[in-house]
C-alpha cells in the first residue's frame, strides 16, 4: 500500500488525519498563494515596463510552454526520482525566481527580457512540480483517504485563487518588492513543509530510458478507457464551457456592475467550490461515481448556459457559485479515479500528460470563448458553450460506458 511511514494508529478515510499529508497540504497551499501573488505582481511589473497588453498575454504562454515542451521528461522524472525531493528542489527554484524579481523591481530594470527569462525558469520549475506533487499525494495516504486528499488539495487551490490575487494586489499597490518578498517567504515556507514530510513509499520505475518509457503515460491513458474518458471529458468540458476570460465583458457591458462587480464574479466559482470540496473531503463519494460525474458535468453546462443569458447580477453570481460547486464534484471524481487507477510506477508520466491537457484546455477554452464572443457576442458565446458542455457529457456517457457504469472510485469495484 502506498502509505507514508507515519500514519495514525487506526486507518482513517480523512486525509487530514495523516501527519505527512498535513505538511503536504500546507506546502501546496503556500505554493498556490505564492503563485497568485507573483502573478499579480509580475503582470503589473511587465505593464509598467512596456505599457503593452501583448506582453501581458505572453506571461501565461511563457509559464505554460515549458510544461508542454517537457511533458515527456517531467513525468518520467517524477517516476524515476524521489517526488518529495523534486518538490523541494523546484520550490527552492521558485523562491530564487521570486528573489530575482524582487531585485529587478528594486533596481528599476528598464528592459522586460530579464523578467521573461525568470518566467521561463519559473515555468520550468512548475512543470516538474506538477507531476511530482500530483503523484506524491497517493503515497501519503491510504486508498480510502485519497478522495478526501484530492478534495482538500482542490480547496487549498480555490482558497488561494480567491484570496491570493487580493493579497497580491494590495501588496503590489504598496510596493512590488513587498509583493515579491512575501511570495518568496511563502515559497521557502513551502520548501520547509515539504522537507517535514516523512519519506513515503514509492514504486520507482526501473525500465531503461527509451522512447517507449517516455511515451508510457500516453500509452497507459490510451489503453485504460476509464482514465481516457475521465481526462478527455475534462478537456472538452473546459474547452466548451470556459467563461472566465469573458467575465470583464459581463461585468462592464452585460450586468453593468463595474470593477467591483467583476471581483465578485471572479470570486463566485471559488466561493461555491470551497464548501463543496470540504464536504467531499468529509463525505467522499462511495457509489455510482461514474453517473454522478456525468450528471455534474451536465449541470455545470446548464448553469453556464443560464449564466450566459442572465441579465441580473443576483442570478449570475448564484449560477457561478453553482458552476464552481459542480466543477469541484467532477474534478474530485476525475482526479481520484485517475490516481487510483494509475500504477505508481507510471503515475508521474500520466499526471504530466493530464497537466498539459488541463493547461491546454484552459488556454484553448479562453481562445474559443474570445473568438465566439467577437463573432456572436459574449452572452451567446457562453450560453452556446454551456449547451455544448451538456452535449459533451451526453456523448461521453455513451462513448465510455465503463466510466459511466463505474460505481466505486477504485478500480477494484465496478
Image (cartoon, rainbow, N blue to C red):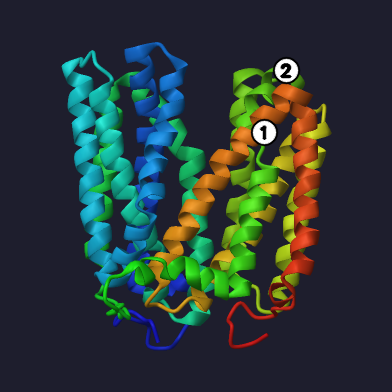
Q: Where is residue 172 in the image (x, y as percent from the top left)?
A: 35, 24
Q: Quadrant of residue 89?
A: bottom left
Mark 2 or 1, which is nearer the eye? 1
Q: In this view, does 96 lie to the left or right of 136?
A: left
Q: From what the image shows, is residue 72 above or below residue 53? A: below
Residue name at image x 45 percent, y 33 percent:
165
Q: From what the image shows, is residue 356 above or below residue 405? A: above
Q: How far apart are marks 2 and 1 (CA)?
A: 16 Å
Q: In this view, does 409 lie to the left or right of 117?
A: right
Name the residue nearer the viewer: 71 or 260.
71
Q: What element carries label 2?
A: helix
Residue that numbered label 2 is attached to: 253
On the rendered image, what quadrant is the N terminus found in?
Answer: bottom left
Q: Is mark 1 on a helix, strand or loop?
A: helix
Dot 1, crowdedness within 10 Å: few (<14), some or many (≥20)? many
Q: Answer yes or no: is residue 337 visible.
A: no
Q: In this view, does 115 lie to the left or right of 222?
A: left
Q: In which quarter of the image is residue 329?
A: bottom right
Name the residue nearer the viewer: 261 or 36.
36
Residue name at image x 27 percent, y 27 percent:
115
Dot 2, crowdedness within 10 Å: few (<14), some or many (≥20)? few
Q: Position of residue 75 (x, y in %)?
A: 36, 63
On the rendered image, what quadrant is the C terminus found in?
Answer: bottom right
Name the residue nearer the viewer: 4 or 84.
84
Residue that numbered label 1 is attached to: 369
Residue name at image x 47 percent, y 52 percent:
356
Amino acid at each position: 500500500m502506498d502509505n507514508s511511514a507515519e500514519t495514525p494508529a487506526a486507518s482513517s478515510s480523512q486525509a487530514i488525519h495523516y501527519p505527512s499529508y498535513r505538511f503536504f497540504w500546507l506546502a501546496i497551499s503556500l505554493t498556490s498563494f505564492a503563485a497568485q501573488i507573483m502573478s499579480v505582481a509580475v503582470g503589473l511589473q511587465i505593464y509598467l515596463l512596456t505599457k503593452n497588453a501583448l506582453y501581458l498575454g505572453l506571461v501565461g504562454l511563457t509559464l505554460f510552454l515549458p510544461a508542454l515542451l517537457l511533458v515527456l521528461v517531467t513525468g518520467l522524472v517524477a517516476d524515476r526520482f524521489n517526488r518529495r525531493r523534486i518538490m523541494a528542489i523546484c520550490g527552492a527554484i521558485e523562491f530564487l525566481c521570486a528573489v530575482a524579481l524582487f531585485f529587478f523591481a528594486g533596481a528599476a530594470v528598464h528592459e522586460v527580457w530579464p523578467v521573461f527569462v525568470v518566467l521561463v525558469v519559473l515555468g520550468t520549475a512548475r512543470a516538474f512540480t506538477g507531476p511530482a506533487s500530483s503523484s506524491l499525494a497517493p503515497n501519503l495516504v491510504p486508498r480510502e483517504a485519497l478522495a478526501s486528499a484530492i478534495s482538500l488539495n482542490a480547496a487549498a487551490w480555490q482558497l488561494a485563487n480567491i484570496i491570493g490575487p487580493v493579497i497580491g494586489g494590495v501588496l503590489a499597490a504598496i510596493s512590488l518588492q513587498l509583493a515579491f518578498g512575501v511570495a518568496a517567504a511563502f515559497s521557502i515556507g513551502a520548501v520547509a513543509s515539504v522537507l517535514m514530510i516523512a519519506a513515503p513509499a514509492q514504486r520507482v520505475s526501473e525500465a531503461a530510458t527509451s522512447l517507449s518509457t517516455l511515451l508510457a503515460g500516453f500509452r497507459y491513458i490510451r489503453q485504460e478507457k476509464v482514465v481516457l474518458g475521465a481526462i478527455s471529458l475534462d478537456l472538452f468540458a473546459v474547452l466548451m464551457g470556459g467563461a472566465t476570460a469573458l467575465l470583464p465583458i459581463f461585468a462592464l457591458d452585460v450586468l453593468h456592475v463595474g470593477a467591483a462587480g467583476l471581483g465578485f464574479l471572479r470570486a463566485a466559482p471559488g466561493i461555491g467550490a470551497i464548501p463543496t470540496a470540504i464536504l467531499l473531503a468529509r463525505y467522499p463519494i462511495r457509489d455510482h461515481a461514474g453517473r454522478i460525474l456525468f450528471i455534474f458535468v451536465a449541470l455545470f453546462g446548464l448553469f453556464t448556459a443560464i449564466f450566459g443569458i442572465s441579465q441580473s447580477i443576483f442570478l449570475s453570481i448564484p449560477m457561478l457559485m453553482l458552476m464552481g460547486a459542480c466543477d469541484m464534484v467532477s474534478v474530485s471524481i476525475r482526479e481520484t479515479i485517475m490516481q487510483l487507477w494509475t500504477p505508481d510506477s507510471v503515475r508521474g508520466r500520466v499526471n504530466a500528460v493530464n497537466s498539459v491537457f488541463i493547461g491546454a484546455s484552459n488556454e484553448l477554452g479562453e481562445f474559443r470563448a474570445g473568438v465566439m464572443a467577437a463573432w456572436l457576442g459574449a452572452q451567446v458565446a457562453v450560453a452556446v458553450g454551456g449547451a455544448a458542455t451538456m452535449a459533451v457529457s451526453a456523448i461521453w456517457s455513451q462513448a465510455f460506458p465503463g466510466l459511466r457504469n463505474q460505481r466505486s472510485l477504485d478500480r477494484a469495484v465496478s
